[in-house]
Image (spheres, rainbow, N blue to C red):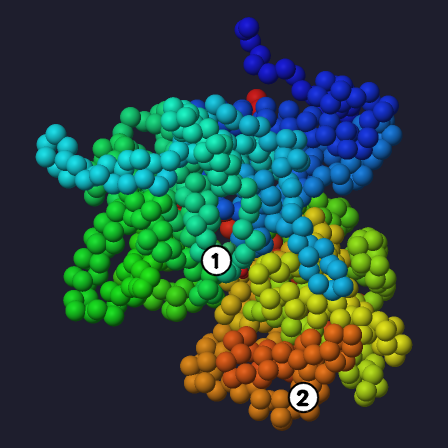
Amino acid sequence: MEGELYVRLGYTMDALYRSITRHLAYSLGVVPTQASKRDIYLALSYSVRDRLLEKMLKTNQRYEDSGAKRLYYLSMEFLIGRSLANNLRAMKIYDQVAEALQLLGTDVETICDQERDAALGNGGLGRLAACFLDSMASLDMPGFGYGLHYDYGLFEQDISNGYQREKPDSWISEAPALQVERADAACIVPMYGRIEETKDKWGRHNPLWLGWNLVTGVPYDIPIAGYGGLTVNRLRLFAARPSTEFDIKIFNEGDYLRAVEQKIESEKISKILYPKDSYEAGRELRLIQEYFLVACSLNDIVRTYEKDYSDFNKFPEKVAIQLNDTHPALAVAELMRILVDQKWVPWERAWDITNRTIAYTNHTLLPEALEKWPESLLARLLPRHLQFIYDINQQFLDRVVTLWPGDVDRMRNMSIMEEGPPRQVRMANLAIVGAHSVNGVSALHTDLIKKSLAPNFFEMWPERFNNKTNGITPRRWLCVANPNLHDLIEDAIGPGFVTDLERLRELEPFAEDPAFCEKFMQVKHGNKERLKDVIFNTTVVEVDPASLFDVQVKRIHEYKRQLMNVLGIIWEYLALTEDGVEPVSPKTFIFAGKAAPGYWAAKQLIKLIHNVGNTIEDDPRARDFLKVAFAPNFRVTLAEQIIPAADISQQISTAGFEASGTGNMKFALNGALTIGTMDGANIEISQKVGRENIYICGLTAYEIEKMKRAGSYKPKAMYDKHPMIKRVVDSLASDRFCPRESGLFAWLKDYLLADNEMFFHLADLESYVKTRELSTQEYVDKTLWAKKAILNVARVGHFSSDRTIRQYAEEIWDLVAIPPTEAE
Ligand code: 26W
């Protein structure tokens, strides 16, 4: 057939209506009049997918024609959430679809609400990856995600009697509406086996990796639409399937049962997302997952490159690879193996190519989250990769020795191999040595990487270390989550700010405009009404939208100090009921977040939040002033409902522990005021919005560091000296909050009073409570509050992930945009 490659897909209401009804009949086999909401959701998703795929093919053609460099973002997590509404907004067909759905007797919100979240991530790191994909597509940059196609995403959280219960999240049934399977691009991944030391025909040392098991990687592509809908990039997720070649071997041996068992084994690899953030379990299957991602991705990347080039000299000019934390750090060894063993590139040359291609982002300083893998495990699973790691380490340590002769401590500290027993491979060291760029995710965090995490590496390669402060996509976190605020802003400053977020500055004068302030507060109130319903439907707690909504939503972790928030609530509760101090405004404390299933202390905190809430609710002296709600099953979709409704955003991690935070940015963009410590990106947010428009409390990272070194934190002394701290802590130790489970929270007293309490709860408590009081007082002054909230919105444009991605592109990747042509 000549001419047009694609059928004409319309974007009018009419065309979309026809497309939906056609998919109802031909993809789903249902008559429109009998279609369920779910059917309509699927038919609409297929209609959208048709259009996205066409644009994706055209985008890819454009990239190919330009010969431009490509960026590959390797990540074990992509926390996408829902896609449909986001895609409708990106393609600018939301209103047309809304009309078409009216004709089908339903409405667009109801239909978008049918979608389940793609929860292929734990928290900040995974959501950052999703925001980055959105920004790269919106900036017309050839940037692609590579990840795993988990059958089960992050568990669903149920609450039963205040305790977290985990349920499997079977996302897989949802996936077909989003993705296309690319069986044509499947690859084969070897693992296990042994090394045979041989010599090649010139008598050179030539180790062979033999006797491996094979697993197939089947890619699934999810289209990622940029804003405007013309550039559509691709997120490629690999699923593990049994290799057919592998089967044949076993069948020849006649071992049918073993073959079937092995089949099940291979599929285990992409079965489930590990639900731990910031704690490394060191499980064999997790390492296999990480290797599987790396092997599939690099195979794909090299194959794409080789379509255009016959040698690897230009590889670093055409390919950039970003490692999202150390989880894909085996890419260093795998790229070396491909170049040296398969492409016959000399070792030194291969090392230069590898180093110039790979860059590494660090997302955490928590020692327990730094990945280390036993040498013995690597020797079994990836014997050839381990040899490359030894060789990389050897030539690296040779350089350290020439720079610092005789400095054995420094060598031991910098070595990729950690002395045993058991001997382990330090993935951060491998990533730092293998990459040309190492970046932190906020100014403070980058500083701490240089000074505390890797000072020796910083001394050796100062130019390698750089900062890229995180950002969030305004498309999801404003347009989709808070359409009314988006419209209000657009009325005030005109269109265009969604792709140029610094333009929000033009809102500043409106902070003084009473009519605008009034409308702004009305939007906030509407969002609070919406959240009230969500909370009522999931908890039966009835919250009052006229009260102050004080919100802390994020993973439950000791360093994030949900416990300090609870201590603050108890403080206010005791002041009210025992000292008769009424808060100047009724307050609703909203929590949400998941605890890793094996993290006992975090799970206890969830129970504590519920029990404190119940005690207050049962107390007639308190229930009209204070309310506590824990919204179950926190996920992207719930965040989209909670964040636009917040008056206050709590960002109270122990200074030095939260690498950046990104929730902090989402709240500020939606007009909440932050109560925060001088940690992560809070510091930069306070600089941007102005010190008078944020509530800062607590010790700084350097003060905490100093006290730790001096051993001068004495929480018991604070408890003895300060009567209110004593009352709060003692109330926890009593059965006041656990009348039916005596002694349940007694451990918290010992925990808080221990000299080695890592997170300095009591050190910051008084400053924190005072700051909360100030914020409540200011909340009552609606003019003042509206002004501060609007100034927050006007001044957080810097935290768009578009800005972050531009910085990565210019300063690390050397990546340029390839914008669409007129014709597209
Ligand atoms: C191997 C187990 C594991 C899994 C995930 C260890 C560590 C992680 C992540 C690094 C944890 C994480 O999500 N870190 C968060 O990354 C965000 C994006 O940069 C930051 O905003 C958060 O501050 C940081 O905690």
Return the disc, 1 or 2, that comes first in the chain's sequence: 1
Left or right: residue 81 compared with residue 18: left
Query: The disc labelled 1 sits on which kind of residue?
Result: Ala
Check mark 2 vs ligand 1: CB closer than 8 Å? yes or no: no
* Residue marked by disc 2: 726
Disc 1, SS: loop
Left or right: residue 12 compared with residue 675: right
Task: Classify the position of the C terminus by image quarter.
Answer: top right
Nearest the eye: 201 or 231? 201
Query: The disc labelled 2 sits on which kind of residue?
Result: Lys
Q: Is residue 92 visible?
A: no
Tell which residue pokes out farthest to the top in this image: 1
Left or right: residue 688 compared with residue 390: right
Q: In this view, does 661 lie above or below 716?
A: above
Query: Is disc 2 surrounded by few (<14), some (14 to 19) or many (20+) residues within 10 Å?
Result: some
* Residue marked by disc 1: 281
Residue 44 figure quarter: top right
Identified at 73% across, 59% down, the residue is: 159
Check mark 1 vs ligand 1: CB closer than 8 Å? yes or no: yes
